[in-house]
């Protein structure tokens, strides 16, 4: 009698999951799983954090304190599906969608995602993350380039993002999708 054995390791590449992400070490690095692939990012540099803090403060003052929603910053897990959990630099979730904010992660796409470029994240932020944010219906995606002192505002158009504005100091950001929001970029880029 011939007995058929079931292999313990499935053939072919395996996609990592949200559960796999939870098992990664807490070692000061940012781990993300994008479409089943692991991405590791070192801790951000001080200037990145300065820009992030200033932008987060401006968003909190204009959006969170006025009751329009919640502003959250990294590290915060955003679970988009079983094989995609990301940690954007900043996110905004409208008040009417606050149920997405769970006990341990955000469970679904934020209304606004902000990624602040650094040498170690530039390629991922502009390609892989941009693609998944559009696919999972994030409405607005902002790319902040501290080195160039520039903010690019993108809006989702089907399953891709369309550039709607590129701004630099001394301009003030006033996005149509967030009426009343005004962010003087000279306050964001010291």
Image: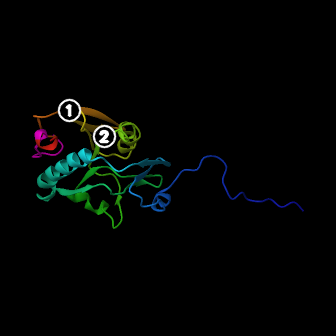
Question: Who is closer to the viewer here, 18 or 161?
Answer: 18
The mark found on residue 165 in the picture is 1
Q: Left or right of 98: which side holds 32?
A: right
Residue shown at 16%/51% (left/top)? 59
Disc nearer the start of the sequence (1/2): 2
* Residue drawn at x 33%, y 57% as measured from the top left: 76
Distance from the alpha carbon under mark 1 to that under mark 2: 17 Å
Q: Which of 159 and 23 is in front in this view?
A: 23
- How many marks overall? 2
CB of mark 1 within 8 Å of CB of mark 2? no
In this rendering, would 82 be left or right of 54? right
Pick out the residue farthest to the front: 46
Q: Main secondary structure of the magenta part?
A: loop
Could you say where residue 72 lies in the image, as x and y percent from the top left? Answer: 25, 56
Q: Position of residue 189 (x, y in %)?
A: 16, 40
Q: Which of the 4 image quadrants contains residue 22?
A: bottom left
Image colouring: rainbow
Q: Where is residue 105 in the image (x, y as percent from the top left)?
A: 35, 61
Mark 2 lies on a secondary structure that is loop
**Mark 1 surroundings: few (<14), some (14-19) or many (≥20) residues within 10 A:** some
Question: Magenta part of the protein: which range?
Answer: 176-186
Was residue 182 drawn as part of the magenta stretch in this picture?
Answer: yes
Identify the mark at residue 117; answer none if there is no mark.
2
Quarter of the figure with the C terminus: top left
For the N terminus, the quadrant is bottom right
Question: Measuring 12% from the left and 46% from the top, which residue is drawn there?
Answer: 181
């Amino acid at each position: 009698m011939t007995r058929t054995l079931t292999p313990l390791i499935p053939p072919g590449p395996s996609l990592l999951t949200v559960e796999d992400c939870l098992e990664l070490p807490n070692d000061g690095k940012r781990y993300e799983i994008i479409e089943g692939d692991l991405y590791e990012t070192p801790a951000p540099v001080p200037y990145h954090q300065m820009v992030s803090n200033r932008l987060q403060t401006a968003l909190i003052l204009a959006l969170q304190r006025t009751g329009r929603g919640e502003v959250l910053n990294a590290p915060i897990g955003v679970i988009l599906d079983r094989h995609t959990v990301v940690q954007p630099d900043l996110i905004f979730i409208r008040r009417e969608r606050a149920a997405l904010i769970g006990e341990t992660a955000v469970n679904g796409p934020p209304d606004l995602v902000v990624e602040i470029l650094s040498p170690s994240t530039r390629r991922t932020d502009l390609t892989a993350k941009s693609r998944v944010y559009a696919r999972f219906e994030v409405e607005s995606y902002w790319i902040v380039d501290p080195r160039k002192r520039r903010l690019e505002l993108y809006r989702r158009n089907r399953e891709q993002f369309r550039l709607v504005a590129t701004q630099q100091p001394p301009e003030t950001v006033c996005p149509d999708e967030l009426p009343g929001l005004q962010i003087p970029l000279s306050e964001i880029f010291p």
